[in-house]
Every structure is written in C-alpha cells, then in structure tokens.
Amino acid sequence: MDAKDPVLARLVEQVGSAQAHRTPLDIRGGGTKRFYGGVPAGEPVDITDLSGITSYEPTELVVTARAGTLLRDLEAALAEQGQCLPFEPPRFAAGGTVGGMVAAGLSGPARASVGSVRDHVLGMTLLNGRAEVLTFGGQVAKNVAGYDVSRLIVGSLGILGIICEVSIKVLPVSVATATLRFDWDETHALRQLCGWRAQPLPINASAWHGGRLHLRLAGAQAAVEAACKALGGERVEPSQANTWWTGVRDQSEDFFSLRAASEAPGESISESIWRLSVPATSGVIALPGEQFIEWHGALRWWKTGAEAAQVRDAANRVGGHATLMRGADRSAGAFAPLSEVLMRVHQGLKEAFDPERIFNPGRLYAGL
Amino acid sequence: MHNIAMNSSLRSLPEVRSDAEVDSSLDQRRRELVAALCQVLPREMVLMRHEDTVAFECDALTAYRASPLVVVLPDTETQVAATLGICHKMGVPVVARGAGTGLSGGATPHRSGVILSLAKFNRIVNIDAESCTATVQCGVRNLAISEAAAAYGLYYAPDPSSQIACTIGGNVAENSGGVHCLKYGLTLHNVLKVRGFMADGQPVEFGSHALDAAGLDLLSVVVGSEGMLAVTTEVTVRLIPKPPLARCIMASFSDIESAGAAVASVIAHGIIPAGLEMMDRAMTAAVEGFVHADYDLEAAAILLCESDGTPEEVEEEIGRMEQVLKAAGASRFEVSRDEAQRLKFWSGRKNAFPASGSISPDYMCMDSTIPRRCLAEMLRSIQEMEVKYNLRCVNVFHAGDGNLHPLILFDAEDADQMRRCELFGADILETSVRLGGTVTGEHGVGVEKLNSMCVQFSAAERAQFLGVKRAFDAGELLNPGKVIPTLQRCAEYGKMHVRRGMLQFPELPRF
C-alpha cells in the first residue's frame, strides 16, 4: 500500500496525534456491528474513505481490497467472475465493510465445511499504535516468512491496529448446489450430522431450528445429485433456499430478533442471543429458551434469559465457549474470560502493537 | 547462505568447536545446568557428552551446525515443564526438536542452549471417528496419523514430501504444506488445537475442539512460529474422509509460456485440482533417469493435474480439466487408468530431490512463492541466471499455488561454485519478492533465510515480529536468533547487496 495515499496519510496523522495524547480511538467502518463485543468508546476514526479494490486477478484466486470497501461491492465484483468469499461473511445491515468483516472475524453458514475468514486471509496492511504502516503476509497462499500476523488480526475487533488493506483468498462458485429439508428433532438431527461427517458427501452447510434441519450440498453436479438421492429428505426450491440461507447468514431470520422489553410485558428478565461455539459432537445442550444450530452442530445459538454464568458454564462443560452476541447488558463482558496465561499473552500483544492503548479500548476485553 | 540440501554422503562443514575446545565458562554453565536438570529428570535423559549430542548438531540443513550445551530427552509433559522451568530460571535458550527433517535450520542448536528433543512423544492419544479428529503427541509422524485414521476411512490432508519422517510438532512449527494444499489447505487449516508450554514452563492451550476459541486467534501465530513462541507437546488435527478415487493427468507443453498459461487457465475455469505440479525439461530428464516413468523428454514442461473425490465427481472434473489443458495447447496428454499408473506419474515428482542428487555433487533447494501468473516469467529469469552465474538449475513447482523449488546444481568443494550458487539463490528470492511473492513458501526462515527477511520486511515490520515474540516469550529463550534478523544483520546484508553484482571480485565476502 502506498504510504503517500492521502486517505492513508490522514489516518497516519490521526493515529500519531492520538498516540501522542493517548486519546482512545473508536475505529468505524459501516457501523453494522456496533452491537458486537464491548461497548465502543473513543474519538471516532472513519475508515470508509479508504475504499476500493486494489487488485483482483481471478486466476490467482486472490482479491486485495482496502478496508472501507463495501462488502456488497466486493462480492459483486467477485460474482462477475464466477467467484465468491466461500466463508459467507454476514451482512447485519447495508454498509458493512471489508475491514469490519476481518476485524469481527465472523463467518457464515458454510464455515464448518470451507473454513473461516481467518483461513482465507493471506495478507494485510495494518496501521499500528505507533502510527507505522506495516504489511504482513502477501497475495500468495503459501507463505511462511515471519509470524502470520495478518491472521492474528482477524477477529481482534480493532484492538491491535487499523486494518488498511486485506488480501483474501477467493474460490469459484460451486458448479451445483441443492438444499434438502428434514423434519427431525434436535437429537436425531445432531446424530445424523455426526454420521455424515466421516463420509465423502458434498455437505456445505446445515441449519437446524424448530424441529427442521436444512442441509445445503455444493460441488460437482454429479456429486450433488448423487448425494441428494442418497440422503433423501425434501428438496427445497432454489430461490426459496437462497432466501433461507441468506437469512441465516445475515441473522435476519425471525429467531435472531430480540423482542424489546415493551413487547414482552411481565417478563422480568430480558433475553439475549448467545453464540456457543462447541465441539460439533457435543450432545444436546440444555438451556432455557430457544435454539438455532449451525455448522453441523459446532455452533449453537441460544435466545435465552439465562444468566451469563449459566450460559458460559454450559459451553465450558463441553469444551466450548460462549459469546454474548446481542443483548442489552454487556457488563459481564461479551467474550468468555481467558486463562491467566492467555490473558498475559493478550496483554503482551496489546503492548507490542498499541503501546499507548489507543485502539478500541475494551472492545475485546476490559483492560485491552 | 542458502538452503544447501546436501547429499547424504556429503562432506559436512568442519565442526566449529570440539568438546575439548569449549571454553571453561560454557563448561561451568553446562555442569550447573546438568546438575539442575538431574534434580527433575532421570540421568539418562540428559545428554552432555559429545558422542551423545553430535547427532543433534544440525537438522536437514546440514551446512549449519552447532554443538548444544545439553540435549534433554524427556518423555512426559511434567518433565518438559520442569526442563523449561529450569532453563527459564537460569536464562538458558531452548531449541525444541522433532525429527530434524527441517530444511531451513529451524532446529539448529544454540551453542549455550538446550536441545529439547521431543522424539519420545510419539503416542497417538486418540482417533475420534465421530468428530473426525485425531489427538496425537507432537512426535508422531505425519504419515502415522493417516495410517492410524485409515481404519475409519479418514486421513490427515497436509502431506509434506518428508511425511514418512517429519513429525506433527514440526509441521505445526513450520505450517507445512504439501502437494495437496491447494485444495485441502496448510497445517493451520487442519489443526484445531495445540497444547504445550510457555517458555517458563506454564501449560497452555491454543485453539479448541470447537471451530474457534475466545479472544485473539493465537493459534494462527503459533502455527508457523518455528518454535519461537511456545513448545508444542500435543496436537489435535482435523481428519477428512478419504476420497474414494483419485486420478491424475500428465500433460506435456512445448514451451514454458503455454504451460504457465495452462495452470492459470485451469484455475480460471473454476477448477481446484487436488494437486497441480510442474517440472521443467531439465528436471524431467533428471527424474526419468532415476525412476523410468516414461516421461515426455521432449516437453519444455510437464504438468501433473490431479482430481479426487467420488467416482462421479472425478469423472466430471477430469473431463473439464482435459478440455482446459487441451485448449491450452497440451502436446501430449494422458490420464491415469488405475492407481498404479497414477503413482507412476507421481513417482518422478516425488523423487525430484534424490534425482537431482544423482546428477550433481550438491544442490541448493530454493522455496519461494510467486503469483501463479508469473510462473513463465520466473522460469525465464532463472534461465538467464543460469547463464549469469554459470550454474545449472532444475525446476519443480507446486504450480497450483505458485510455490517454486528450483534446485541449483553445484559442487560444494569448489569455493567459487559455492559462492555463485549463493548469489544465484539470493537472486531467485529477490526476484520472487519483486514479483509480489515471498522468500519462503513452506520450508521456513530458520537460520537460512534470515538475510532474505531483510529484503521482504521493513525494520518496523521486523520490530513488530519481535514484539510478537516477546508477548509470548519475554526473555527470548525459545529458539532465539531464528526467523527475525537483527537490525545490524540487515544493515550488513544491505552493504553486501550493493557489491553483489560484481562477481569478478574474488574477495567478495560470503553471506
């Protein structure tokens, strides 16, 4: 990335001055994920002007885009070439940016089969807390020169620096897809998903909710057709299936909306949406409320009024962790507490990238 | 110096110091260390006599050697923790070591440090067919995981060529690839959890059995950190169903350009082959003499393009590949009929290194990555360099992901050839960086590519790497001196750089 770029130069100056004055900065893209993580605080830094696709070579399966590029625009450019971001990043609202996608590190329905945002990031230009513009990784998939810093930044919620530009591995859109529907209860659905895992089936995504499992197949035409025949179930009409999976990806499905307190008079405890990331083979997890299961069992969304401690405990017991995704009360922290040794590493990394602690304070953990 | 992968019979460089010459302060240090270690470890696990430690003086990059102060061979995690605790307290560097198959000197001993050999951690803890995961100790060989998983129809996808010998702990340290990583990813993409110890001996876990873990994605930096952030003792990997069928296409091209364009064209048509490899004419000739696989010796380049999956998938994909490769101008074209023929196609590629050893006293193996579209340009540049440095170079590429392994042929007994070889290697790496690539695709930096790191990264970027190291290992005791070159070293390399073009000066210092 060219350090003389006027937009980048302005950001460098703003960070330099914030560093000198120890001014906390609140890094903002499209502002579509403000609900995620700790409550944002600090002087706003707008990165939306740092936009545009820098390079895109379809035959390299790599796209490089500046952080403020709209996710919508990036995905449209890829679609023109028959390619896509295979990890299906969610768009919680219009205006989501590439920088926000990487900073949040959230992946959509296909994640369990194709990998996460982190898996697809190849390189990054980062503006750190010393106002230095640094480039890590690159535009090639195989690269072991130095630590893989660009992947460390994925999901860091901006606490280590401002993401300026990202190179991402892209993939061709699958030749064929099909969605199947099964009316199965949770226990049966989890058992089936488990059994399919060890078979060479082109399963790309799964979602269970309210006694119904949706299964998406993607791959070569012949493989998808053969799998449809072998698996049975009811085939969902393609446009209807698309609407369904988009709703799951963007959490616009009914399950993900929280009733405002006024709509639920008489309920003393407000509901939150929790994200439980657990080993896929964990059996039924029991909590009060309602559940939505993705990633072949590895992601369990709970809409519940249960206390944070109860939810975290349920996730811990099976070797997973719970994140408060949406909820009014973020005072107990959005993310699962870390062991002492891991927190020490986190503190050390914060010190290394952002010694004056100016970037997104408290967004990941209090004190970082 | 660069990656000088010498033949097994090779003269090794003379040992810098023999046991007798070790100065008394090191000797004193060794006695104190051994005394402390023997408090917590059985005596036979602590090696200090020269004849016992000599086997640990280098990894597969044999040109770099050093005598470690002590070699420790623990067999429990408690002993690993205790060893680290003692070294931490005494300020002694620790170099963890697996099978020692690394090609960049990542396991080269530190003269005043301990070699922590984890060879005894060779137990497969658990193969879980239901979750499709394997939990294994760090010293388990890469191939042993797939062999153990085979009973369940599963396997571990990353397959570095050294997979019969290299360990999973080493794979984690190097983020190893293999011929199938275009489709199935690198080590990072196939590892769920790493368990181990921090420099001070505290136990730690990175990642989890879920698909992510809370907080920063530390697993991303631990994998590929070349043993500089933590010591790995146990790894949980993802297993995938073994594809019922694999078939391979062997296609010849009469010029390098069309072979390079064919690679790009396969990808452009939305095909992700299970493997996509290229050999140039010189390499093909070398391996044909070695394995007799009936390779096309007239071709300027040969492509191996593999499809795997269910029989329906493979049939469909092979059809599409055939169309694309023929349209790209393949002059000879063959699809493997059965498993035996597929393995025959691969035999030459898999034997590229030993075959090169059979036609030259020594060879230096490079490992850069470039954007795929630059393959032909890179090959042409290498041909020009052959003239410039008056040395031959044979080429194998993981073409699908742009990872090059040019093998520069030379005779290490001829000092001038050795010098020209090093310059040739440096030129390839710098050309790779200029084309938008990287100085190491899969072999790691170790000690061997420290100078090249000065070319690829700015001083601020290198300082940031150092900051990452200190966040994990504040005392800089784990594998110190590897991966991140010092400012001073880069400054000196910069000076040599200027003089580099002037080959006629015999006094030019070696680096």
Image: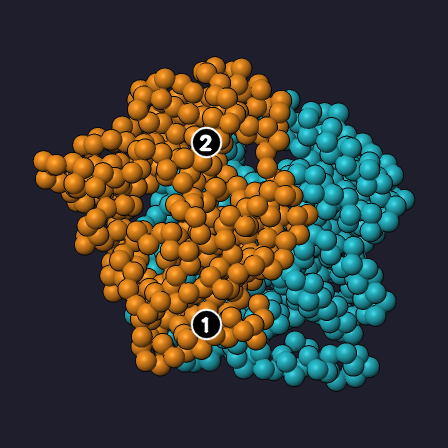
Chain colours: A orange, B cyan
Q: Residue drawn at (60%, 66%), measured in percent from left and top?
A: B448
Q: Is residue B357 above or below residue B410?
A: above
Q: Quadrant of the N terminus of chain B?
A: bottom right
Q: Which mark is residue A312?
A: none
Inspect this view and state whether residue B195 appears.
no
Q: Is residue A90 above or below residue B59?
A: above
Q: Nearer the viewer, residue B484 or B143?
A: B484
Q: Residue drawn at (39%, 67%), measured in percent from left and top?
A: A45
Q: Nearer the viewer, residue A187 or B236?
A: A187
Which residue type does callout 2 highlight?
Thr
Instruction: Return the x and y of residue B181 as percentages of the image width and height.
Output: 59, 44
Q: Nearer the viewer, residue A337 or B386?
A: A337
For disc 1, the marked residue is: A11
Instruction: Return the x and y of residue A342 as percentages of the image width and height.
Output: 30, 57
Element on which disc 2 rests: helix
Residue A304 horizontal side relative to residue A233, left or right: left
Q: Residue furthest right?
A: B298
Host chain of mark 2:
A
Considering only order in the chain, which callout, 1 or 2, is on the residue closer to the N terminus? 1
Q: Residue drawn at (52%, 79%), measured in percent from left and top?
A: B487
Instruction: Return the x and y of residue B224 as percentages of the image width and height.
Output: 49, 56
Q: Nearer the viewer, mark 2 or mark 1?
A: 2
Q: Quadrant of residue B314?
A: top right
For disc 2, the marked residue is: A243
Residue A269 horizontal side relative to residue A230, left or right: left
